[in-house]
Image (spheres, grey):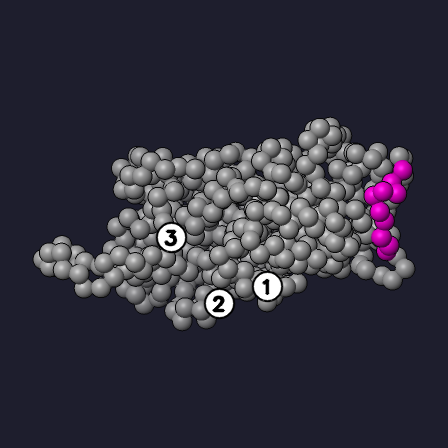
Amino acid sequence: MAPYVPGDHLNYGHMKVGYSVDDGQETSYLDPRLPLLQHADLTDKVVLLRVDHNVVKKGKILDQYRIDVTLATMYNIIERGGRPIIMTHIGRPYDKKSKKLTVKQDESVDAVVAYLQRKLRIKFAVPQFHVTENEGIHDIDTSINWLIHDLRARKIGGIYLPNTRWFAGEEDKGANLERFVVQLAGLADVFVNDAFGSWQPHASTYHITKYLPSYAGLCMQAELSHVREVLEPKHPFVAVVAGSKYDTKIGPLTEIYKKVDNLILGGIIYNTFLCAKYNIRMKGVEESDIELAKGLVEQDKLEKKILELPILVETDTLAGRFEGQFRTIHIKDFAEGQQYGYVVDVDPASFEAPEVREVLESAKTIFVNAVMGMMPAFWHGTSKMDEAIDRNSTAQKFFGGGDTLQEFKSLWPGLYQAALDSAKYYLFTGGGTVLKVLEEGDPFNLPTVRALIENGEHFSHQNGNSSPNRM
C-alpha cells in the first residue's frame, strides 16, 4: 500500500487523496532494456498484438486459459486508446514432407473469436484473403483497409487476422517472408508481443520487430518473471519431463539435469531411458534414440538424480484400453534382452512408492511438463502424479505446456481452478518455451525477446526501468 498523489499536471502538489494497492506484479526483475507495454504511447494507435491462442483442435477450444491470460493486455491497449489487430497461429497446416500448406476451417481462428466476443461483449471482424491451393495466403490485400477504417472509428472492437500459419510468409525464409512482414507492418503503428509460447523466430513473432516500435505484453512479462523461479529454484528442485520423442529433448534434458536434485521422466522419453539402462526393448522406441539415451544413463550412474517410477503399464495394442490386453510390469523384473509391447503409462502405484513420495513431499520447487500416459485411454498415471504433487503444500509448483494443462484441467477440474488462484501454483502458457529457457539459461536470450530488446535500442523506447537487477 502506498499513498496516491494526483498527477503533477493537476497542480495538486503533494496532496494525498487515496492509496494504491501493491498487486505483486513488479517489473524490476525484468531486463531494463526490455520495452514494456506500460510505457508505450497507444493513444489513437493501431496496435498489432501477437498472442498464443493455439488452443483449437478440430474447430473447438480445448482450454481457454491461454486466451484468458492475454485479456489484461487487450484491456490495457484499449483502455489507453489503442485499437487492436490480433493474430495467432493454430495447428500445423504446413506439411514439411509434401511442402503443401492446407487451409482447413477447423484450424481457423473462428472459435477463438467467438469466445472473445462472448467474454468481452465486443465485436471482432476477421478479414478474408485469397487462398492459393497448397500455398495458403500470399498477400494481405487492401480490402482490410475497410476494416481498419471501422476499427479506428470504433465501429468494431478489434480485428482478428486469420491463422498466421495460413500465410505463405509466416515460416518462410525468402521473398514470401519479407513481403508478409512488410504487409503486416503496414497495418499498424505499434507491435506488442504477448506470445511467450511462440518463441520460434517467425514473421509474426520476430521479423515484425524490424519495422514497428515493439513492446512486451503483460502475459509475456509475467511468464518471463516466473521462469526466473525455475532457473533459480529453491532446493530441493524436482522436474517432471515427458515427451513422445527423445531426440527433441536432449538439449533441455542435459541442462535440466544440471539444475535439479531429482528428475522424473515420463512417456517415450522414460521408455527410452529404461531401454538404454537395462538393455531391453519396447515397441515404439527407436534404436537411434536408445543410443542417444546412453549418455544420460552413464551420467546418472554417477549423480543418481533420475528417480525411476517402478511400475509401468504394458499393452498389446495402441487402439485403446481393453481388458485382458494390458498389464503392469515392474522394472525390478527387467532382464537383459527382454522384449516388451507398448509401454503406455506409469501405474499409479508408482507414486506411492516410498522413495517417490519422499522426493515429491520434500521438494521446494517442482516443475512439470509431462503427461505420463497415452491419452485418453491411459490417464491413470497422470492423475496420480497431479495428486501426489498437490500433496506438497509448501513447494512452489510450475506446470507448463498445452497437453500438460489440458489434462490437468480434465482430470482434476477443481484442483485446476484452485491452482489458477493459488500463490503456490503457476501455469505457464508455453512448457516447451520453459524447456528452451532452461536449455539456454537466460529467458532474455529467446529470439523473440531478444528482438524486442534490439527493437527498443533501435527505436530508443526502452521501458525506463533503471533497475540493474536481472536473473
Residue 338 in view of the camera: yes
Disc 2 marks a residue whose amino acid type is Ala
Left or right, 339 with reference to 285: right
User: Residue, x 47% and y 61% (percent of image)?
Assistant: 68
Give the extent of the magenta segment.
Answer: 326-335
Q: Nearer the viewer, mark 3 or mark 2?
A: 3
User: Residue, x 38% and y 52% (percent of image)?
Assistant: 25
Q: Report helix, strand or loop for mark 1.
A: helix
Disc 1 marks a residue whose amino acid type is Leu
Q: CA distance from mark 3 to mark 2?
A: 30 Å
Q: Report helix, strand or loop for mark 2.
A: helix
- Which residue position is annotated with label 3? 25
x and y percent of residue 419 in the render?
A: 54, 60
- Which residue position is annotated with label 2? 114
> How crowded is the residue under tag 3: few (<14 C-alpha within 10 Å), some, or many (20+)?
few
- Which residue position is annotated with label 1? 415
Q: Which circle's residue, 3 or 2, is located before the other in the chain?
A: 3
Q: CA distance from mark 1 to mark 3?
A: 24 Å
> How crowded is the residue under tag 2: few (<14 C-alpha within 10 Å), some, or many (20+)?
few
Q: Is residue 323 above or below residue 267?
A: below
User: Residue, x 31% and y 54% (percent of image)?
Assistant: 46
Q: Which circle's residue, 2 or 1, is located before the other in the chain?
A: 2
Left or right, 11 with reference to 6: left
Left or right, 42 with reference to 118: left
Quarter of the image where the N terminus is located = bottom left
Q: Which circle's residue, 1 or 3, is located before the other in the chain?
A: 3
Disc 3 marks a residue whose amino acid type is Gln
Label at residue 292:
none
